[in-house]
Image (tube, rainbow, N blue to C red):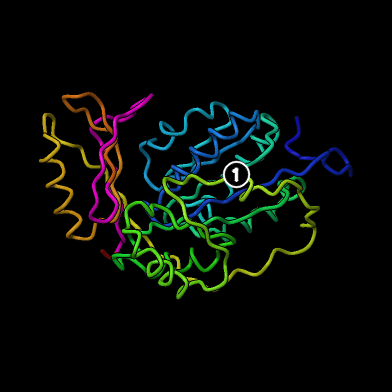
Amino acid sequence: MSDDATTGNEAPARRIPALVISGFLGSGKTSLVQHLLACAQQEGIRVAIVSNEIGALGVDRALLGAGGEAFVEIEGGCVCCELSDDLIETLQILYREVNPDRIVIETSGVALPFDTQLNFWREPVSAWIGDDMAIVVINAEQLREGRDLEGTFVDQVSSADLLVLNKIDLVPDDELDAVEARLREIEPEAPLVRAERGRLDPDLLFPPDVGAIDRSGEAPPVRPHTHEHFTTEIWEVPEGASESEIESQLEARAEAGLLRAKGFIETPGGPRLLQLVGRRIDWTDAEGPTPNLGRIVLIQRANG
């Protein structure tokens, strides 16, 4: 079977809307995707998900595995640049084999959403991708602390079609307006909504009617930006280490510039998901598969 989205000169029967979900490391992108997937399953909507992890432990695959064959994970880099060809190939396979109603692309925490959207102008996906939107998820606690609000963070926020101020439950109610004002200093114009754990009405993200997008011409020019480099490391947690010992080790690494940590750990109470964002460490009981138990992916800036 040909990989072409059309046969001859025929136009595709329908165009499929695409959502690019971006945001800095630990902003809560996966929680938003989980919510959208759950809503779609309740409504009988076929959603194809492409998840892009900078580390290669398959944590997001475990968290989003309910997507089945309509879920594809692209690991080891960013779909906005060095893995863009992989993204095109993946989208075409999903179009041909799943025939989804919606496409959701969750970028890595260091990818740029606008650069990812430019891939929709490439053949053969340009023939069938419909309306697209870049959602940038922001960790309200990160804004409140004034942490890592430069470089990649600014480039992501500045290219958003919609800003989602997430994790507002981690910020006192009387400080939320000041946090939002800080975000508005970076991006004053994009629409903004607040959320807890990525819970949003899907109708905000997928308009009911898909417009006729003409991508027969040249793609929009690339916006000026800096593409920072980040490093990943796999930490083999010592067997038998307690949760407090693990936290102590991660806190020391955070002092030295660690931005993000994520992985499954075997504990006396069973397997748990460990996540570090900035200085916050969260443990949650694991549900479903727990790949690479005892291995944690660590991410920091290459010059950190």
Q: Is residue 24 magenta?
A: no
- Return the residue nearer the eye: 226 or 285: 285
- Return the residue nearer the eye: 58 or 43: 43
Percent x, y of residue 215: 76, 57
Which residue range is magenta in the image? Answer: 276-302
Percent x, y of residue 31: 44, 42
Which residue sits at x=45%, y=75%? 185
The answer to whether residue 48 is above or below residue 128 is above
The answer to whether residue 160 is above or below residue 8 is below
Which residue sits at x=23%, y=55%? 279
Q: Quadrant of residue 94?
A: top right
- Return the residue nearer the eye: 213 or 11: 213
Q: Is residue 294 magenta?
A: yes
Q: Secondary structure at mark 1?
A: helix
In the rendered image, the residue lying farthest to the front is 174
Name the amino acid type tagged 1: Pro
Is 45 left or right of 23, judged from the image as shown? right
> Where does the C terminus fall, quadrant-wise?
bottom left
Which residue sits at x=67%, y=34%? 100
> Where does the N terminus fall, quadrant-wise?
top right
Percent x, y of residue 139: 38, 56
Is 170 left or right of 180, judged from the image as shown? left
Mark 1 = which residue?
Answer: 202
Mark 1: few/some/many CA within 10 Å (<14, 14-19, 20+):
some
The number of callouts visible is 1
